[in-house]
Amino acid sequence: MKRTRTLSVLLLTVLGLTGVTACGSDGASRAGEGGSDSVEFSIASAVLGPKEEVATYAVGKEEGFLNDARLKVSTSNADGSVAALQAVASGSADITAADLGAVMAAREKGVPVKAVGGLVQNWPWRMAVPPGSDIKKAKDLKGSKIGVISLASGSAMYARAYARNAGLDPERDVELLPVGVGAQAAAALKDKKVDALALYTQAYTSIENTGTDFRYLKNPDMFEGIRSITFAVREDTIAKKRDVLTRYLRASYQSMLFSAVNPEAAMRDGYGAFPQILAGKKAADRLSDDTKVFQAWMDTATPTSGKPAEFGDWGAISDREWTKTVAYTKESGQIKKDVKRADAWDGSLLKKANDFDAKDVVAQARKAAK
């Protein structure tokens, strides 16, 4: 207990962490039930739009992958990646899906967490303007106001890096204004309070579902290969719960494959596990739009080419991707020095985590009720 409290104080001091709150889950206790091992998954946000909590946990729960893995998983919500890592480091959660840059930043400050498996593998952030905007390329942003989720968010880091790559001074040549996401962000652009938005693809899809159109500026090559959301655990948990973590990752990647093949069925599973996504509406009234939003997230989390059954190597992060992610994380100010791969990454669970028959998962997904 003393060690847990010490870690919590360390995290709160060096990372500025906020609290973690429980959300509606399956109510599993921390002790194993019925021969199953218990796992606490910290979701690094509120469950509003469908993303990793649907693609991994909900599908795993509803389609039986977690049961087959002999796991009883419960969930909690954290206010962002940093807070989710607090939950993991303090021992109140076993695993989270957090931004890899946040893992590197935590590791640089001495927090004993490590990434153990990749999740989002394609850069999710885009710069968007109204279709009739005079802004055609990155340099045209000089003198503009860019809407970001918040000044401390990943979108602000992206916007600064985007401007800097175009030869602009992110402190003098552009102005960042917090506009949130969804209707609030759309209104800020429509009312010309901002000239452009810096959001993630899933957020744009949600807005586009309401009838709003965007024109997207090209992302420079510097963003290609940067890794984002990644499974992370406390370092000593890798040794203590090696088999449990391997089974959890395997079930998660099976669920990801299922979601890639049949995103509509995955979305239905999401409603079952997280009814709050429906916001009081009927599933039939939301399924089409929510599936589009979920598909946008899946597009960032899976290879851009090839058939789902051929994806393979779930969770792998290459040396090149690691190096590019370190460079971006340092440029964005999250870390001061290069973080060595061995210090913040342990891929030793992935070989066994990938030990499943993809054809069986694909067949199950295709048979899922429409």
Image (spheres, rainbow, N blue to C red):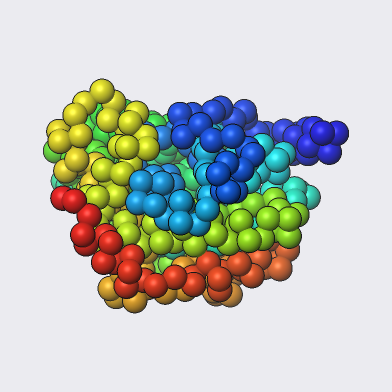
Farthest front residue?
A: 34
Residue 75 in sight from this viewpoint: yes
- Between 91 and 74, which is closer to the camera in this rendering? 74
Residue depicted at 28% across the width and 26% down the height:
279
Closer to the camera, 95 or 49?
Answer: 95
Please give the count of numbered marks on the rendered protein: 0
User: Residue 61, percent across and down?
Assistant: 41, 46
Figure quadrant of residue 285: top left
Q: Nearer the viewer, residue 15 or 215?
A: 15
Position of the N terminus by quadrant: top right
Placement of 289 over or under 231, stated as above or below? above
Which residue sits furthest top?
280
Residue 17 in percent (x, y) is at 65, 33
**Residue at the (61%, 67%) spot, across then down:** 349
Q: Measured along the vertical axis of the image, is residue 318 above or below residue 328?
A: below
Left or right of residue 368: residue 112:
right
Q: Which residue appears at 27% of the width and 30% of the height?
A: 278
Residue 11 is situated, as x and y percent measured from the top left of the image, at 73, 38
Asked whether the viewer can see residue 212, the reply is no
Rendering coords of residue 163 (x, y %): 44, 53
| Residue occupying the far right of the picture | 2
Residue 310 occupies which quadrant of the picture? bottom left
In percent of the image, x 44 and y 70: which residue is there? 356
User: In the rendered image of this protein, does residue 301 appear above or below residue 184?
Assistant: below
